[in-house]
Image (spheres, rainbow, N blue to C red):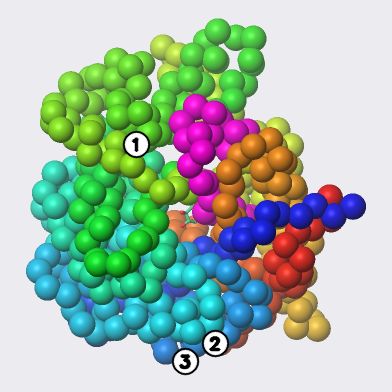
């Protein structure tokens, strides 16, 4: 039996700038918080950095990778713009050479019939803005909109899909709460101001950009990493409360303001102290955050198991069952759960994308020079079946993007975690399509898969 996706379903793959481009100082690029953070001893596995990564800043490499996308049959490609390539210090006019790189990319995609999907922020804040407080400082919102406007004026005519913020949760919690990601701040008190300013930057960007360029209509939306929060012991009132709190911090803190124009009452209450009384929220902010969008992108990898710690504080527990190399539990049904929940509680008829989904496994080149990754094929197959089931259940799912096209720099895990459909031999920069590449190519060609 074959299951088929709706006509026009958008088959894609996703990447981000710092994880693939390399060339951190080329053509007048300023430093980002990641350029700074990777140099802090002990933060990144083996002390590795994204200084070379997949070398896609190189024009020849970029062309070759876009040709691979054609071979794969991609309909759309998500990439992020590194802000300090455009504004080295996070303010003022455009750095023409930095902009040219993204123009080449967009031209190249267009020429190949692949729809560019541009992410304005996948965590690459100019270091100059971090020196002034980064996302804790409300001024960064205005800077972001200025940067977004430069890009929009330059590229709107060619880029149909605009993602404002990728995973504001990750920036707020991992970047400013736990110090695991750049800028490496570990201060729970900054998390909520950061989340608020990221949300505000999203809303203000949509408000500012929509309709700006005559005769051009583009789609705007945020990308959120929504994860099911599962109580370890569902019959324990404490675990259920802890899971609800985790769901508040992780999911509802972002979904509610964007789609309902308010922060969830229980989060406001529970986090009153950590958020310093929420004094950073001004009268008009929630209306701005609530600005209508054209889609929601959902990144889904794994559910989270939560048990109650002291005071019913949420604590992570390991998931039962098989995991990816990253240690993330493999749970395809969680994708259906998340899509259905978002649709039912928040987005209704709004188109959704699975903007990231994928897995890292211990991929290697065998003596024949092949990279066989049946585990990834199983993973993707399972999740695509669930995505299809969600569509059958009425979820307006418009597309699906695999994370990622290429193996790449996986943040603090550096080059250990391989998420690509294409194996990258880093020292030579040779690309070897994995068996999952061939499998996904067939899925795209058939617009479906075996059920
Ligand atoms: C997501 C990130 C992406 C990548 C994947 C594995 O949270 O958006 O950059 O690291 O996880």
Q: Please state the horizontal and vertical placement of residue 17, each as a whole percent of the image.
A: 39, 68
Per the image, label 1 sits on a secondary structure element best described as helix
The residue closer to the viewer here, 106 or 323, is 106
Q: Quadrant of residue 428?
A: bottom right
Which residue is labeled 2 in the image? 64
Q: What residue is disc 1 on?
A: 258
Element at label 2: helix
Which segment did they paint magenta?
337-360
- Which dot, 2 or 1, sits closer to the camera? 1
**How many labels, in total?**
3
Q: From this viewpoint, is residue 213 visible?
A: yes
Relative to residue 202, is residue 143 drawn left or right? Answer: left
In the image, is the residue at mark 3 within 8 Å of ligand 1 by its beta carbon?
no
Name the outermost residue toward the front: 215
Residues tagged 2 and 3 counted as in contact (Cβ below 8 A): yes
* Residue 379 in view: no
Where is 401 relative to 100, above or below? above
> Is residue 386 shown left or right of residue 168?
right
């Amino acid at each position: 039996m074959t299951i088929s996706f709706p006509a026009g379903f958008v088959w894609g793959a996703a990447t981000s700038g710092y994880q693939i481009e390399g060339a951190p100082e080329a053509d007048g690029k300023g430093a980002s918080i990641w350029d700074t953070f990777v140099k802090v001893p002990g933060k990144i596995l083996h002390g590795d950095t994204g200084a070379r990564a997949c070398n896609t800043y190189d024009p020849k490499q970029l062309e070759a990778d876009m040709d691979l996308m054609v071979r794969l049959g991609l309909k759309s490609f998500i990439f992020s713009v590194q802000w300090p390539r455009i504004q080295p210090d996070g303010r003022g006019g455009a750095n023409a050479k930095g902009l040219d790189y993204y123009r080449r990319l967009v031209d190249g995609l267009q020429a190949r019939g692949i729809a560019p999907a541009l992410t304005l922020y996948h965590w690459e804040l100019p270091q100059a803005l971090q020196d002034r407080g980064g996302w804790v400082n409300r001024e960064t919102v205005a800077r972001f909109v200025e940067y977004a406007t430069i890009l929009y004026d330059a590229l709107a005519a060619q880029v149909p899909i605009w993602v404002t913020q990728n995973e504001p949760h990750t920036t707020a919690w991992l970047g400013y709460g736990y110090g695991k990601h750049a800028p490496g701040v570990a201060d729970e008190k900054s998390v909520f101001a950061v989340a608020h300013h990221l949300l505000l930057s999203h809303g203000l960007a949509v408000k500012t950009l929509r309709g700006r360029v005559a005769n051009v209509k583009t789609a705007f939306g945020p990308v959120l990493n929504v994860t099911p929060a599962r109580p370890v012991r569902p019959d324990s009132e404490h675990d259920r409360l802890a899971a609800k709190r985790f769901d508040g911090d992780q999911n509802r803190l972002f979904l509610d303001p964007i789609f309902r124009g308010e922060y969830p009452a229980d989060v406001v209450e529970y986090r009153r102290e950590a958020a310093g009384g929420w004094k950073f929220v001004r009268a008009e902010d929630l209306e701005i955050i609530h600005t209508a969008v054209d889609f929601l992108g959902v990144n889904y990898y794994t559910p989270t198991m939560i048990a109650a710690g002291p005071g019913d504080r949420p604590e992570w527990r390991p998931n039962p069952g098989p995991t990816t190399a990253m240690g993330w539990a493999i749970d395809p049904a969680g994708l259906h759960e998340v899509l259905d929940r978002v649709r039912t509680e928040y987005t209704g008829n709004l188109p959704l994308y699975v903007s990231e989904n994928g897995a890292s496994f211990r991929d290697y080149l065998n003596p024949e020079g092949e990279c066989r990754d049946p585990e990834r094929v199983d993973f993707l197959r399972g999740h695509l079946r669930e995505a299809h089931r969600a569509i059958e259940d009425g979820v307006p799912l418009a597309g699906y993007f695999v994370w990622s096209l290429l193996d790449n720099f996986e943040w603090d895990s550096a080059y250990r975690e391989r998420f690509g459909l294409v194996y990258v031999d880093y020292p030579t920069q040779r690309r070897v399509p994995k068996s999952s590449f061939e499998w996904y190519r067939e899925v795209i060609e058939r617009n479906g898969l075996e059920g």
